[in-house]
Amino acid sequence: MLSDIEKADAAFSRYIRLRDTNEYGYGRCIETGQRIFYKRNQSTGKMESNCDAGHYHTRAILTLRFNEANVNAQLSTNNRSGKSFKYMRQNIARKFGQDIVDWLDSMAKKFGNGDYEEPDYISIQKYYNQKSEELLKKKMF
């Protein structure tokens, strides 16, 4: 059984992948610009994907774990490789603005891990499940 933080992570990750793909389920990796997908398989009805919700600043920094600018769709192979995010910073700046990147960097240094409690994770899960349902209504799958 999933913990509340795992459920919140799953709901948030689903939202990010839906946000960063078009109505047909395709988008671009925030790091490399390569094609990504997150869409429903027409035969099985299950969601399929080659991307993750990749964190610019690690999700271990709780103050940024659920920050929408800090997390973007990224090829799973890149996200899980452990390599540095060479182009992620500049692409986030293009997407959200340099001031947001600077703010993310300062928040990561200033506040570190922050403090969440169990009810916070339950609220996060509900919030992002609702946002995902709204996005799914606009998808063509």
Image: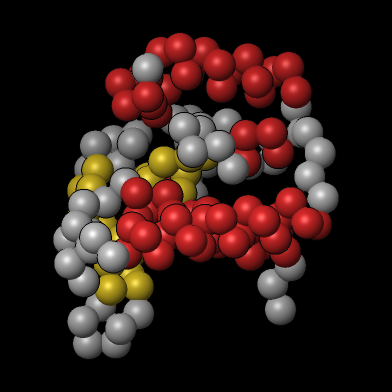
Residue lying furthest bottom: 43
Seen in the picture, residue 55 relative to 104 is either above or below; the reply is below
Seen in the picture, residue 45 relative to 17 is either above or below; the reply is below
The N terminus lies in which quarter of the figure? Answer: bottom right
Q: Residue at x 62, y 34 (%)?
A: 64
Asked whether 17 or 36 is in front, the reply is 17
Q: Is residue 58 left or right of residue 139?
A: right
Image position, residue 6 (x, y; %):
66, 62
Q: Is residue 22 left or right of residue 73?
A: left
Q: Residue at x 74, y 51 (%)?
A: 120
Give the quarter of the image for residue 44.
bottom left
Asked whether 137 or 57 is in front, the reply is 137
The C terminus lies in which quarter of the figure? Answer: bottom left
Q: Residue at x 78, y 56 (%)?
A: 119
Image position, residue 93 (x, y; %):
37, 19
Q: Residue at x 42, y 49 (%)?
A: 16
Image position, residue 43 (x, y; %):
22, 87
Asked whether 116 or 78 is in front, the reply is 116
Asked if one can make out residue 86 in the rendered structure from this viewpoint, the answer is no
Give the quarter of the image for residue 58.
top right
Q: Is residue 141 left or right of residue 126?
A: left
Asked if one can make out residue 42 in the rendered structure from this viewpoint, the answer is yes
Image position, residue 53 (x, y; %):
46, 49
